[in-house]
Amino acid sequence: MANLKDNYDVIVIGGGMGGLTCGTLLAKQGLDVLVAERLPRPGGYCSSLRDEGFSFDPAVGILEGCDKGGVVYQTLTELNVERELELIKLDPANRVAGTDFDILVAAREEGFEDDLKRLSPGEGESIHLFLEECKALYHEMALVSAGSPDLMGLGQKIGFMKDFLLKCSHLRKYSAKSAREVTHSFFTAPKLRAVMHGVAIFLDPDTQASILMNIIGMAANEDICYPKQGGVQALPNILVKALERNGSQIALNTTVNRILVEKGRAIGVELEDGNQIRAKYVVSNIDGKHTFLKLVGEEYLSPKFIKELNTSKIYGSVVSISLGVDMDFRAIGIQSSDLSYCPTNDIGELFSGQPEKSGLMVRLHSLLDSTQAPLGKSTVGIVACVSPITLINYWKLDKDGQKGKEYEAVKENVAGKLIASVEKVVPGLSEHIVYKRIATPITFEKATLNSEGSAMGWYPLPGGKMRSQKTPIKNLYQAGHWTFPGGSVPAVVASGRNAAQLILKETQ
C-alpha cells in the first residue's frame, strides 16, 4: 500500500474511468486528491490483463467519445494529455455474422445501409428510416448528456427542458420503449432484427431502445476507436499519470471498508486495515448498493431510499473468455478485429442465457496491436451475456459462496459451448488454444464489487428515472455507471466530470 496522508481535500473510492476522471480534473484545479483502488491496476472495467505474453481486454473492448467534440477527447484536452493517446479509428466498427448473413457495420457513405437492403430487399424503406432515426438520436443524446441536471440552476433547468422538448423528439420517443419493441416494429425479417441487436450484442433487448439506437448511430458517425498500443488500459494509465503529475495520488491494492459520516456529512473513509483518512469530500465510483448499504450504513439512510436500493433492478453480467492461439488470422482471411456472432435469429433465444444460443462478441485485437501476442500467435476475446440472476444456483457455488469443484465444472462447460459456437466464424479455433482464462459474473463481482458482476449498474428500464450524482449524505457524491448518465466509457467519463464540477462548485 502507498504511503498515505491523514487528510485530503477529496477521496475517490474506485479507480474506474469515472473516478479517475473526477480525481484528475480536481487535481488539475489544485485540490489534493486520493484515489483508492482495491485492484492492482487502475481502470475498473476499462482495463487490460497481460499473462504469458498475451494481452486481453476482458470487459470494455473499444473506446467511444474520442473524436474531437467527444467527452473523452474533451477531458484529455483539458488535462493537456490528448496527444498521449494514439488511436486507431475502427471502420468497419464491427462485423455482425449469423447463420444466414454477414454484415460490416461501417460508416462508409454506401456501406451498412446498402448491405442491409441486399439482405432484405423488401424492407429498404424501413431500413433507411431506422438508420436515420439512429443518427438523429445519436446527436440528441450528445446534446442532453453535455450537461448534468445536478449542476443546473433553475433557469438552466428550464432551458434544458426546452431543449429536451423541442430538440429531442427521438430521445423522448425511444427512451420510453424497449429495444426489442422498436426493432420488431421496424422489421419483419428476423435476420434484420438479429443484425440490429448484434451491433450491441451485450445489450439486453428489454433495455431502453434509445441505448441500442445510440450505439448504431455512433458506429455510423465513425466514433469507434482502439488504442494503437496497450489495449484499453492505455486510457486509464494516461489519467493516472496526469493525476500524479498534478500532485495527487492513487493507492492501488487499497480497499475502503467504511465511509465516515458525522452529523449527516461524509468526513472521510476507513480502510481495510483500520486506518482512517479524513477528507472534505468523498466520491464513490463503485457499486451503488455497496456504497450505501455497506460503506455508509442503513442508519444514515431513509427507509424509502433503502427500499429503492434493494428493489431496483440491476443490469446483468457477462462471461468473458480470453484465449491465446497459435493462429495467423490474416493468413486465413479474417480481417475484422471485432465481430458479433448470432447463432440464431430469434431474439428471445439470442439473449436467453443458453451458451449454445447466446449472442457473442468476438475480439481479435492482436490484429490491431501485434504486441498483444507473441510472434506467430494471436489473441481471441469472447464476451457473452450468459448471466442469470440466480448466480449461486447457476454457477454452483459452495454454501459459503466460495468457488469449488462444481463451479469450475460449470465454468468449463459454459466456456466449451461458447468456444464451439465461435468456431462457426473462426474455424478450428479449439485445436489451436495455447492459453485460456475464463471470467464469470462471479469473477467480476469479486474483482469490482459490482453486485452480481453487473456490467452497467442499474437496469435502464424504458422510461426509467435518472440517478442523481448527489446523495442523501452531504459531501458524498457518485460517479461511474451506477449514476447519471449511465453505462459506457463516454457516460462514466461524463459522470466523473460532473462530480468534479459539483465539488468545485461547493468550494467556490
Image (spheres, helix red, strand yellow):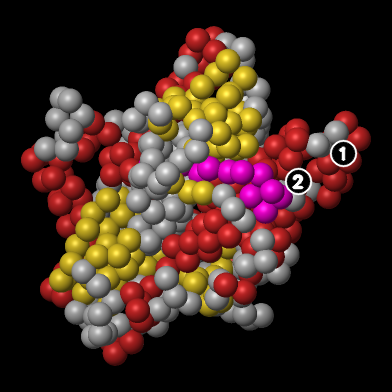
In the rendered image, which quarter contains the C terminus? top right
Kind of residue at disc 1: Gln
Q: CA gap, disc 2 to disc 1?
A: 10 Å
- Residue 436 within the magenta-colored segment of the rendering: no
The answer to whether residue 446 of the structure is visible from this angle is yes
Residue density around tag 1, few if under 14, some if 14–19, many if 20 or more, within 10 Å: few
Residue 501 relative to residue 351: left or right:
right
Instruction: Locate residue 113, reporting x and y percent.
Output: 60, 73
- Residue 28 within the magenta-colored segment of the rendering: yes
**Which element is circle 2 on?**
loop
Identify the residue at horizontal 49%, vertical 72% (top origin). 227
Magenta residue span: 27-38
Instruction: Locate residue 248, reporting x and y percent.
Output: 57, 50
* Of the image marks 2 and 1, the number of the one nearer the N terminus: 2
Q: Which residue is mark 1?
A: 156
Identify the residue at horizontal 58%, vertical 24% (top origin). 267
Identify the residue at horizontal 58%, vertical 43% (top origin). 33
Taking depth in this image into account, of 487 and 197 the one nearest to the observer is 487
* Furthest residue toward right: 155
Kind of residue at disc 2: Gly
Q: Which residue is mark 2?
A: 147
Residue 407 relative to residue 382: left or right:
left
